[in-house]
Every structure is written in structure tokens, then in C-alpha cells.
Image: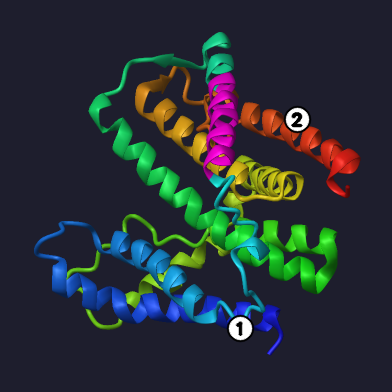
Amino acid sequence: MKPASVLLLYLVLIFCTAAVVSPLVFWLVGGFVQWPFHRYVDRILMISAAAWLVFFWKSFGLRTWAEVNILWRTLPSGVVRGMVVGLLVAGMIFGLMLGFHARVWVGLSNPALIPIMILGFLILACFEEGLFRGVAQTIFIRQFGLVGGVILTTLVFVVMHFVKVPSDFSPNPVHWYSGWVAIGLSLSAFSKIGWLGGYLNVLVLLGGVLSLCVLNFRSLGPAIGVHAGLIIGQHLIEEGSRSVDASGWLSQPMNANPLTQVLLALLLALLFFRFLRHGKN
């Protein structure tokens, strides 16, 4: 099978595994971990993706870490530099929100949890970048060329961010088929035209920025850092501030805000021109 076909099989197996395993895990540990069922499904989707990736590694035509831009020697420094950039962009967005009186700072309710939050989002960024800009982008570029590979990677990145079980799905009791219902609901977002807005624009721009980070620096480190820095900044903004006017266009959440779109577009342009000048050397 071609790597692109293997990737499709890989995605199908992730969903099927989560559908079957989620009720079993809920029955086993639901009495100890008081999560709603939809959170079990979301977490098991991630775990399934990591587990099947190990199984399919060679089937994807991959042999070394370097092929997916994981260079252990420079990875930590790349992550730190990227995180600084991501936090700076988030800080600029928040500063503009304050300047335009779109939001006001009210303070964090529990600052002691910040280190745990940073670690959690860093792990999430490592997982997503390893899967999308590491494995998927490498496969797509080999199959469809540089431009086609980046476009397909960004498309998959955007689509997968709409695959999320609705937070109001909490079956009681949980049946053996509840996982399949949850997976079906997670795909229902594509039937709603309301998602064609700022959030979609931000995801497309972010996907392009992260792809170009990898292409420019030949490492996943900067992409992981930028990704983590942005979502950490977003979380701090949402937790520590409130909208002055909920109907105002600049009061939208950071992941759909026009300011985010403008700054990501500028960052994308800078990375694109850098790649044109230095990326092919």
C-alpha cells in the first residue's frame, strides 16, 4: 500500500478504536475519574493515534526520526525559541484587545495551576506537531510535492480540529454503542455552516505558519514551541480576562479573533519570504 493509503487506514483505525474502547475504559475507571463520557472519547482518540502510529511507522515509509524532522540535539532549543514567539504573538493580541477596550484583565483564579497547564499544552503541541507536521507532512510531500504536501497537511490539520465530541453528550448509562454515537457526533460539525468563520481562518493560517516553521528550520522544535505558546497564551487570556462588549468584533475568543488572523497572516508572510530566500539552500 502507498503511504497515503496507509495514512487513511490509520485514521479509520483511530476512530474505530476510540469507538470500541471508550465505553470499556469508562466502565473500568469511571468510578475513580469523574469525567463526562465525551472527555474519555477525546482522550482515547489521542491515545489511539499515538498507539497506531507506532504500529504503522514503517508502513508509512519512515525509518529514522530525522525523516520527520525530529532532531533530538536541537529540539529543546527550538521549542524554547518557538514558545517565546508564540507567547509574544499572544501577548500582542491581548495588548491590542486591551488597547481597543475589547477585554479587561480580572486576574487568574488559580495561578498555582499554571505550570501544570503549561506542561499539558506542551505535551499536546508535541503530539499534534509530531502527527501533522512530522509524519503527515513528510508523507504528503513525498507523494504530492512540496506545495501539495503543505496544502494537504493544513487541510487535515483543519479538519481534525473539528472532530470533537460535543460537550453536552453525556449518555446515562453508557452503553457499548455509546462510543460509536460519540464518534458520529464528533463528525457532525461538518454539517453546520456556522463553523465557516474566524475559527476556520485562524486554523488555516496557523497550519500554514507551523508548516513553514518546519520547512524553514528543518526541525519540529520551533513549530512545537509556537503552537504551545499560542494555546498557552489563549488559555491565560480566556482565564484571566473578560469581554467588555460580547457583541464587539474584537471581543471574540483569541482562536477566532480578527487580530489573531492579522498577526498570523503577517507571521505567515515573514516565514514564506524567508523560505523563498533561504529554505531551498
Q: Which residues are magenta?
A: 76-93
Please indicate whether residue 182 sits to the left or right of residue 113 in the image.
right
The amino acid type of the residue labelled 2 equals Leu
Residue 67 seen: yes
Binning the other alpha carbons within 10 Å of mark 2 as few (below 14), some (14 to 19) or many (20 upward) gives: some
Give the structural element (helix, strand or loop) at label 1.
loop
Foreground: 120 or 25? 120
Q: Name the spot of residue 100 as percent of width and height, x first.
A: 58, 11
Q: Which residue is mark 1?
A: 59
Establish if 164 lies above or below 219.
below
Q: Residue at x 54, y 40 (%)?
A: 79
Q: Which residue is mark 2?
A: 266
Q: Residue at x 59, y 19 (%)?
A: 92
State the image quarter where residue 85 is shown. top right
Asked if the magenta segment contains residue 25, the reply would be no
Foreground: 163 or 231? 231
Please indicate whether residue 276 sits to the left or right of residue 194 in the image.
right
The amino acid type of the residue labelled 1 equals Ser
Q: Residue at x 70, y 65 (%)?
A: 138
